[in-house]
Amino acid sequence: MVAAMSDKNALVIDAQGVCSAVRQVPSPNCDVRPNENVPDMVVIHNIHLPPGEPGTMAFSGDAIERLFTNCLDIDAHECFAELSNLRVSAHFLIRRDGEIVQFVPCNLRAWHAGVSSWQGRERCNDFSIGIELEGSDFVPFEAIQYVQLNLLLNALQARYPIAHVVGHSEIAPGRKTDPGPFFVWENLMSSVLELRQTGYISRS
């Protein structure tokens, strides 16, 4: 069972889209949202580096941060060579121990979704906020990651008109599978579940 949120642990997103309570690691892999779009979607991903197979998964090191800041040492692992020219980022990363890292202010466009569409809108990066969970399609996520994700979602809903909370697989079906079969949507806060089920959040 995931612990309930507490006001004393609340996060705040400021007018520039920065959450000063979390660690900041600026990524160059971002740009201005076209037409000054205000984000109304959150996309949930999973990521782990180096990639592993079931039973060999290990989560440690700073390879994700290095990837998002274009500092990945391609000689550190045999699989990194294929990532050498990749330019990607997300707004936030939630690590296995619950630490939240912000790479891109939410008011800017992070490069996380790739070729994507949702309800007739293409290029989901233009209007979305990307949250990466350190994990994979092969193992469960940690309880603390859901706690932190809920805190972050609550802060995002307080700042932006979030109308959609989706998995990467839902906006890029057939191309992406994350957040994967071990992601438990029911562990998210009631307003997100209500949004996913009805398309509407009651504000009373």
Image: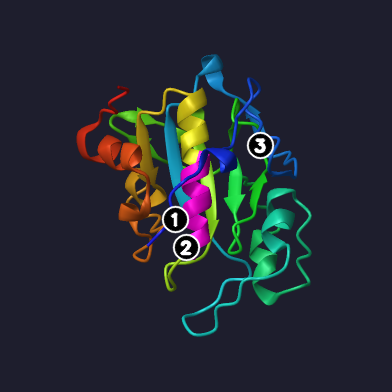
Q: Residues within 10 Å of mark 1 (few under 14, many from 20)?
A: few
Camera-nearest label, 2 or 1: 1
Residue type at mark 1 is Ala
Look at the image and say whether residue 148 sits in the magenta stretch: yes
Q: How crowded is mark 3: few (under 14 residues within 10 Å), some or many (20 or more)?
A: many
Q: Look at the numbered disc 1 and give the secondary structure of its residue.
A: loop
Residue 10 vs residue 22, the one in the foreground: 10
Q: Which mark is residue 144?
A: none
Q: Name which residue lies at 75% across and 50% down.
A: 70
Look at the image and say whether residue 124 sits in the magenta stretch: no
Q: Name which residue lies at 43% across and 73% down.
A: 138
Residue type at mark 2 is Ala
Q: Is the magenta stretch mostly helix, strand or loop?
A: helix
Q: Mark 2 points at which residue?
A: 143
Q: Name the residue under label 1.
A: 3
Q: Residue 104 carries which label?
A: 3
- Are circles 2 and 1 on residues that touch, CB within 8 Å? yes
Q: Look at the numbered disc 3 and give the secondary structure of its residue.
A: loop
Camera-nearest label, 3 or 2: 2
Rendered location of residue 202, percent (x, y) = 27, 26
Q: Name which residue lies at 39% across and 31% down.
A: 122
**Magenta region: which residues?**
142-152
